[in-house]
């Protein structure tokens, strides 16, 4: 009975998650710099943050945030500040050691908790994600759809997001790919820093519609 609605939700989510944004940039940076394990934990962090968005959307809190300029701006500035922080941190990257030694060293430096937190915070604080899930649960999903079905959609959205970014992490953590990026040394980290800062600035300038 709800298959048409579910497929609509799945298609919209696929288009949204596939478009590069802060989640993509953070997962790629973790995977390339620290390896597949860190990239995967970051992807799982992003996926877990979806439960946060789904939770407040079901509770109606997202509607309050979307209607309050103060709350929206607070969320926006927190997210922008976090992206700027990790962006400027990446800009300070120093020239790398020889590729093989550096890849081995970096892979063991990142803790699972640190990588997971990075992904969770990046997605959880993103006000665009807040507005996306709010519109999904108020416009696309019929309010008369049983809460259990809507919660089921939420589980799917979290799992699909995690799987997508795990695949991204798997791709960018391949030895050949990492070795290619490693040859560019600290310039890759600095480039990713610029990307993250640009996303942060763009986010900070976002107006609530």
Image (cartoon, rainbow, N blue to C red):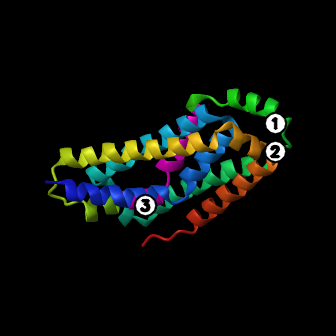
**Farthest-out residue, front:** 176
Q: Magenta region: which residues?
A: 114-133
**Please, what is the dominant secondary structure of the magenta stretch?**
helix
Q: In what quadrant of the picture does the N terminus appear?
A: bottom left
Name which residue lies at 75% across and 40% down: 179
Q: In what quadrant of the picture does the C terminus appear?
A: bottom left
Q: Which residue is mark 1?
A: 99
**Farthest-out residue, top:** 108
Above or below — where is 42 with respect to 23? above
Whole-number angstrom distance, CA of label 3 to CA of label 2: 33 Å
Above or below — where is 92 with respect to 132? above
Name which residue lies at 38% across and 63% down: 66
Q: Earlier in the sequence, mark 2 or mark 1?
A: 1
Kind of element beneath mark 2: helix
Q: Which residue is mark 3?
A: 15
- Residue 195 lies left or right of residue 17; in this view the side is right
Q: How many marks?
A: 3
Q: Nearer the viewer, residue 43 or 51?
A: 43
Residue 62, position in %: x, y? 34, 56
Q: Which residue is mark 2?
A: 183
């Amino acid at each position: 009975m709800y298959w048409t609605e579910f497929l609509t939700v799945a298609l919209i989510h696929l288009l949204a998650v596939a478009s590069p944004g802060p989640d993509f940039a953070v997962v790629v940076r973790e995977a390339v710099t620290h390896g597949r394990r860190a990239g995967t934990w970051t992807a799982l962090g992003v996926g877990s943050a979806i439960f946060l968005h789904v939770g407040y959307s079901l509770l109606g809190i997202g509607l309050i945030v979307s209607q309050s300029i103060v709350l929206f701006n607070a969320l926006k500035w927190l997210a922008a500040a976090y992206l700027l922080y990790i962006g400027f941190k990446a800009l300070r990257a120093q020239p790398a050691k020889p590729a093989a030694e550096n890849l081995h060293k970096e892979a063991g430096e990142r803790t699972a908790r640190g990588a997971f937190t990075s992904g969770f915070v990046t997605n959880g604080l993103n006000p665009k994600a807040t507005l996306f899930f709010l519109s999904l649960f108020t416009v696309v999903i019929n309010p008369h759809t049983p809460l259990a079905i809507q919660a089921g959609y939420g589980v799917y959205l979290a799992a699909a997001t995690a799987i997508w970014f795990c695949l991204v992490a798997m791709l960018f953590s391949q030895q050949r790919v990492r070795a290619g990026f490693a040859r560019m040394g600290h310039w890759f980290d600095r480039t990713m820093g610029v990307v993250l800062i640009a996303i942060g600035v763009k986010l900070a300038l976002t107006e609530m519609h």
